[in-house]
Image (tube, helix red, strand yellow):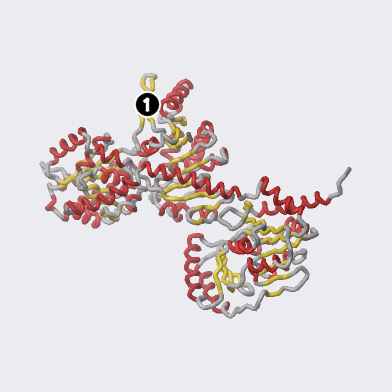
Amino acid sequence: MQRLLTVANRLPVTINKRKGKFSFTPSVGGLATALSSFKETHENFWLGSSNIPSERLTGADTKSIKKILSSKYGSYPVFLSRKTLEKHYQGFCNKTLWPLFHYFIQYTEFDKITWETYRNVNRKFCDAVAAVAKKGDVIWIHDYHLMLLPQMLRERIPDARIGFFLHTPFPAFDVFRMLPWRKDIIEGLLGADLIGFHQYDYANHFLDCVQFLMGYEQKMGLLTTNDRVVKVDAFPIGIDYQKFSTDVKEPFVVKEMEKLKSQIGDRKVILSIDRLDYSKGILKRLKAFDSFIDKYPEYKKKVSLFLVAVPSRSNIEHYRMLKKSLDESVGRVNGKHGEIDWTPVVYMHQSLPYKTLIALYGLSDIALITPLRDGMNLIAKEFIATKTDGRGVLILSEMAGAAKEMGEALIINPNDNEEIVEAIKEALEMDEDEQVERNLFMQERIRRYDVMKWAGDFLDNIHKTKEIQKEMYSRKLAGKLRSKLISDYSESMNRLVLLDYDGTLVPITSTPQRAKPDDDVLRLMKELSGTPGNKVVLISGRDRKTLDEWLGGLNIDMIAGHGAWFKLNGKEWKSIEHMDTSWIDEIRPVLEQYVDRTSGSFIEEKDFSLVWHYRNANPQLASIRVAELKDDLTRLLANLDVGILEGNKVVEIKNESINKGRASMRFVKGKRWDFIMAIGDDRTDEDVFRALPRKANTIKVGMGPSESKFILDGSAEVRRLIKDMNSSLKKRRAPQKH
């Protein structure tokens, strides 16, 4: 049975110590419930920090706690000091990451000391996981407290199956870039095989940040890093629908509802329940209720707002200020509208027992859920699940992740006071048939994609991502595959070697002029091209003048402009065929406009093509400009034999008949080659891979989808391969000593 290691900030067990003895209370939560459903297919093991500071424990205490947690609760504790807990959780997590990720920039603190603590805590978790992890385990890391852990574990356990899920929003790049340690966070997350978010908006924000900070490209959510493929996807977390829809009918809950109903009478109940947090918009919804009574006084004594604010992070200043403001606001609204026999706002600053909460859900006519920013918001789903008779109205903020799934609710802008007021009125006046119809759609959706389905989907996708990686790795030119290729090369007599230049023989640079070959490249190419039986062809998108200047002294044939020109060794350049270039003067002004609008981009003009380079431009802006440019060019070039080619951070406009594949066939045909090898790094080289005979050894530089047989990590690996090929032939030809 496969083991699932769940790694979260806290254990699913609360530990108490009284008179030297320990007691253990399991936590009730969606995640614990979800993972318990996998007990038949996975052995579940949970790692998290203990709620008791380490300085309160003796060595014997920690040993005893570990033993009990492991044997009875399938858990493993990470012990942290009080000071560390404060700087990690109260500090970096909730004074930096939480406000930043929820767009509350004014509350965000950037403190190097708490950052160092955050990193150290992630290291402690890494040590703890590494100590218990076994080969084949699935490691599932949760939330913003542990965003550095995936990469730390990747370095310790390279072949581990690692998933990461973020339970908060992930901000847009313009917000995330404010974090001084932004690149560290991204690198930390990219250690995972699968990175999950509640919604595609958050996933796309993350992908934008990766592109801008790391330069990695993605296709259909698959990120190609230097050495791995990482999947990024959306998995909207659900609830235990069956539990909520069943428990609302329990005798205790029904009795609790009847008790509350006898106190309320015929009044309608609007329920507001949240953790006391500035991201939840509690003050704004209280203001909206105040405005509602002002605007529609006929509802006085006919409706009450049950406002439950669950205590949270009370030792952080912003939360203490929020509590004070809320207390004052509730007093003001009740003082303004209240009467002897009617309290407009029933205010509870406390945590409610589970069954009392279910009773409140079942009793309430309206749920008013108006967060200013929320990753998901499961209260909305829980409320709808309890409405077994279909009656009840959900008013939901469009800023909650749940709004993407619950479009039948009354969706409002939480910053629009008037819109909330009108939504309350609409909810109170909505007829029962419409309530039932709206709720049935939402119930079916959240019943079908419940918390168990969510967890199952995530785990399935970790395995699928590993299969994709395995397929990629199976094509990596290493070990026996590499040895066989070198052996085939040294044993053959007639060899054709087709090499791209940029990104293949030399790394990609910020500007084309910086990619001049160094002595190592020239030496390797000289030896490769000087070997009897070798035909070496350089196939590049560069212009003829640059190739002559840089590589003209070598014994090689060259193709320039992606196939527009060819030059046999020692001969003159020739064009493959006559090309019409009259379109260039028409298109150049278009590209110049895009250069003016896209800082960091520039135009490269070749004999038969124009190239727009955007490597140094802002990736977010560049992606928009690329789409716009392609759209403009498609219309302008509609009736011409001219095509648009996307390369590595470039858009090239050239004659359709020009491509590297067609040019390479000039050298393949007419001779019986017993060894063919082609190496390239971008989309233009795919034409070569497709054109060559099936026996050819085609090699893609860098991870990612390709028509090639093999993959190499980078230009340094290409050089090592050529060096080993050269060495292999030398050894083969060296006279044997007897």
Position of 657 compared to 138: left or right?
Answer: right
> At which x and y percent is residue 643?
55, 72
Label 1 neighbourhood size at 10 Å, few (<14), some (14-19), many (20+)? some
Position of 108 compared to 277: left or right?
Answer: right
**Which is more toward the observer, 98 or 160?**
160
**Do we see residue 332 in this rendering?**
no
Q: Amino acid at mark 1?
A: Phe
> At which x and y percent is residue 162?
50, 42
Residue most extreme to the left: 341
Position of 692 compared to 412: left or right?
Answer: right
- Where 634 falls versus 528 (above or below)? below
**Which is more toward the observer, 596 or 423?**
423
- Where 66 falls versus 482 (above or below)? above
Name the residue rendered at 25%, 35% in the picture.
355
Picture mark count: 1
**Do we see residue 527 in this rendering?**
yes
Query: Where is mark 1, residue-wise?
Result: 24
Position of 188 compared to 97: left or right?
Answer: right
Name the residue rendered at 28%, 50% in the picture.
442
**Which is more toward the observer, 642 or 422?**
642
Q: Quadrant of residue 495?
A: bottom right
Residue most extreme to the right: 738
- Where 278 falls versus 695 (above or below)? above
> At which x and y percent is residue 468?
53, 49
Q: Quadrant of residue 7?
A: top left
Name the residue rendered at 86%, 46% in the picture.
736
